Each structure stands twice: as structure tokens, then as C-alpha cells.
């Protein structure tokens, strides 16, 4: 039988991960497949128990809503996943199922040129408190960002920041606070780096849009949405119409997938045709 990797979660049929990994497998000439498998939380442990005994299984990426449940079913965790208490990749290493978290590295990939510059101040408004938000907040704090983390329950956002032990002085807010307009007088000085990040499922096909009023974004902000279905969310459309730079979810997906591919299939992907790949992910 052919070796294979998978992406698991619910919903998962719309995932673009199979197209990405299949593209890289073909370029590398690797005899393997990558597919999706619907798995809900009560079936996560049975799924992993079954795959543990399958010699053709190379590993799985884990998406919503299983990232924060998966650590309990791994034999051990990579230090990054242990810190985050969230797993988006499980691979077999010897007899062990090992959990990793590649979300932070993937999220930062399209920002690396920007973050190589010096800034007087960096701030990120991060909407969400789930597994992806944990990885994003940790990665941004390590890059010197002051965070404003918004969730339906600000207490949960506070607990997340405390549990992660993030360096710096950060803040929390109710996500509803950003739904209406503000007349806050933003500092328009040069040399600042501001991000507005949607790390929630809001805006995903079948979900309500993220309630975010553009007036909460400082001048020059970059809007970054990790949702991948649809690629162009109402959050990004509104930002672009107001003249802001935007980054869609394909960028993070590609970045974290590259790390996952190497761990599952034993070699780094050939990324020379990534632009064409991105354009095909619609």
C-alpha cells in the first residue's frame, strides 16, 4: 500500500492541505498520498490508536477544533507544542506519537521581511483564543509585539497569556468591543508595525463574519486572516477597500505545511513553484 498523510478535523472537506502536499509530493517524485479525514473530538483517540499501528501512515495535520485536545493523546510533545498546549501535527517517531505545533512558524513566514526591519513599536490586535491564536500570540510576543488579545471571554484571553508566560506587557478585551466604531486618536508616527489578526473561525464559509470596525486599526496596519475558505473574507475585503495591506490564510497554511511536509515525508518540499501553487488555491 502507498504511504499517506492526512489532515483531520471538522469541518475538513474544504481543506487546501491535500492540494498543497500533493503538489509537493509530485514535484519530489515521492510515492505517497495526502488526504483528509473527518474526525470529531470523541473519535480523536481511536483515530490515533488505529493510525499508530498502520505502517503506511506518515502523520497527520490537525485543524479546528482538535488542536487543544490532541496533546492528551500524544506520547510526547515537542517543546513548542508543550509550551502552547496545542498540537497541529502528529507524527510517529519510533514507537511514539509525537505532537508538534508549526502554526507560529507558518504564521510568521509572510512577515519575515517586514520583521527584519527595525521598528519603534510593534502592536498586534489578535482576535481569538483557540489553538491557532495561542501559537500566533507566542510567535508575535517573541518578535517584540505588544498584544491586545480579544475573545468572547476576556478572562480566557487573560488565562491564555498567563499560561504561555509571554514576554512583555499585554492586554485583553472582549471581541465585541471591536464591532462598533471608535474615535480613538491613533499616533501616526512612522516606524511602527501594527497587525490586525483574525485567528477565529468567523468569516469562514458557513460562519458569521468577524465583527470588526475598521476604525480600530491604526494607520498603516496589516490585516491578516488565517481563514482559508473563502480566501477573500469580509474582514479582508473591508480592509482592502479602506486601503490597508492584507494577507490571506494561504500564506500561513503554506508556511506551516512546509514544516509538516518535512516531518511527515522526510525531506523539505521543493518550493520553487509556490507562487503558482498559491494562485491555484482558490
Image (spheres, rainbow, N blue to C red):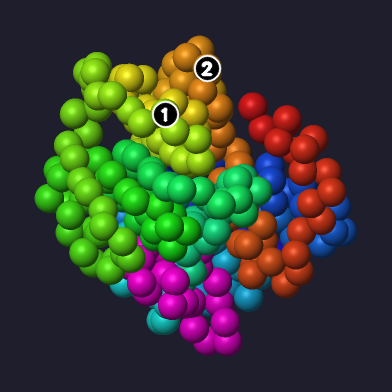
The x and y percentages for residue 218 are 39, 29
Would you place residue 144 above or below residue 243 in this image?
below
- Alpha carbon separation for disc pair 2 and 1: 15 Å
Q: Nearer the viewer, residue 75 or 166?
A: 166
Q: Residue furthest bottom?
A: 94
The x and y percentages for residue 257 are 62, 54
Residue at 42 percent of width and 70 percent of height: 81
The x and y percentages for residue 43 are 34, 58
Of callouts 2 and 1, the N-terminal one? 1
Magenta stretch: residue 200 in it?
A: no
Q: Nearer the viewer, residue 75 or 215?
A: 215
Q: Can residue 4 be seen from the camera position used here? A: no
Q: Can residue 148 be seen from the camera position used here? A: yes
* Pointer 1 local density, CA inside 10 Å: few below 14, some 14–19, many at least 20: few
- Per the image, label 1 sits on a secondary structure element best described as loop
- Per the image, label 2 sits on a secondary structure element best described as loop
Magenta stretch: residue 80 in it?
A: yes
Residue at 75 percent of width and 64 percent of height: 268
Magenta stretch? 78-98
* Pointer 2 local density, CA inside 10 Å: few below 14, some 14–19, many at least 20: few
* Residue named by callout 2: 243
* Residue named by callout 1: 188
Amino acid at each position: 500500500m502507498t504511504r499517506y498523510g492526512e489532515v483531520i478535523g471538522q469541518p475538513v472537506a474544504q481543506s487546501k492541505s491535500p492540494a498543497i502536499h500533493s503538489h509537493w509530493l509530485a514535484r519530489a517524485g515521492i510515492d505517497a498520498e495526502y488526504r483528509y479525514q473527518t474526525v470529531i473530538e470523541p473519535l480523536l483517540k481511536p483515530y490515533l490508536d488505529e493510525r499508530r499501528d498502520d505502517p503506511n501512515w506518515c502523520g497527520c495535520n490537525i485543524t479546528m477544533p482538535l488542536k487543544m485536545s490532541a496533546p492528551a493523546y500524544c506520547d510526547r510533545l515537542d517543546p513548542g507544542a508543550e509550551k502552547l498546549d496545542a498540537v497541529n501535527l502528529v507524527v510517529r517517531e519510533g514507537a511514539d506519537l509525537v505532537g508538534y505545533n508549526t502554526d507560529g512558524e507558518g504564521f510568521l513566514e509572510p512577515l519575515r521581511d517586514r520583521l527584519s526591519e527595525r521598528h519603534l513599536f510593534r502592536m498586534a490586535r489578535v482576535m481569538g483564543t483557540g489553538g491557532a491564536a495561542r501559537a500566533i500570540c507566542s510567535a508575535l510576543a517573541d518578535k517584540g509585539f505588544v498584544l491586545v488579545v480579544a475573545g468572547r471571554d476576556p478572562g480566557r484571553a487573560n488565562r491564555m497569556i498567563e499560561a504561555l508566560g509571554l514576554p512583555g506587557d499585554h492586554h485583553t478585551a472582549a471581541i465585541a468591543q471591536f464591532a462598533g466604531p471608535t474615535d480613538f486618536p491613533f499616533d501616526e508616527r512612522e516606524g511602527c508595525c501594527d497587525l490586525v489578526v483574525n485567528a477565529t473561525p468567523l468569516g469562514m464559509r458557513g460562519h458569521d463574519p468577524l465583527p470588526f470596525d475598521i476604525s480600530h486599526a491604526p494607520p498603516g496596519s496589516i490585516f491578516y486572516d488565517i481563514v482559508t475558505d473563502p480566501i477573500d473574507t469580509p474582514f479582508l475585503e473591508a480592509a482592502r477597500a479602506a486601503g490597508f495591506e492584507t494577507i490571506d490564510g494561504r500564506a500561513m497554511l503554506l508556511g506551516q505545511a512546509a514544516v509538516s511536509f518535512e516531518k511527515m515525508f522526510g525531506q523539505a518540499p521543493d518550493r520553487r513553484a509556490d507562487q503558482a501553487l498559491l494562485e491555484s488555491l482558490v
